[in-house]
Image (cartoon, rainbow, N blue to C red):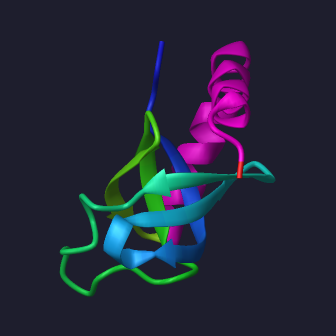
Amino acid sequence: MCLGIPGQVVDIVDPAQHKAIAEVEGVRREINVGLVLGDEGGLSVGDWVLIHVGFAMSVIDEEEAASTLDFMRGLGELFEDEVQQFRESTPL
C-alpha cells in the first residue's frame, strides 16, 4: 500500500525541472515538486509537503505534518514499509 507521507523540503535543486530534495525520517530523496510550485506562496526550503510516489501532492503546515507523522508512526509496520519504500526510491 502506498500512502502519502509528510516530508520536509531541504533543498530545491532545479526549479525548472521541478526537482527538490525532501527528508522523511532522516532519509533524503529527490522528489518532483511541479504540482505545488504554483501554489499560493510557492515552495521554499523548510516547507512540509505530502509526498506520494515521489511527487509532492500538496504543501502542508508543520502542525499537520507532525500530527500526520505521529498518527502514521502508530500504524507500526505499515509506516515502516512506507519509510522503507521512500528509502529505496531513486537515491540522491
Could you say where residue 50 lies in the image, as x and y percent from the top left? 42, 51
- The residue shown at (64%, 44%) is 70
* Residue 58 in which image quadrant: bottom left
| Residue projecting furthest to the right | 26
Q: Is residue 73 left or right of residue 31?
A: right
Instruction: Name the dominant secondary structure of the magenta segment.
Output: helix
Would residue 90 be counted in the magenta stretch? yes
On screen, 3 above or below 5? above
**Total tally of numbered discs in the picture:** 0
Q: Which residues are magenta?
A: 62-91
Image coords of residue 57 (percent x, y): 31, 50
| 72 or 16, nearer to the observer | 16
Q: Report the residue at 46% width, 41% height from top.
A: 54
User: Where residue 30 appears, x then y in whole percent?
Assistant: 58, 54
Q: Quadrant of residue 35?
A: bottom left
Please state which of residues 80 and 11 is positioned toward the viewer in this rendering.
Answer: 11
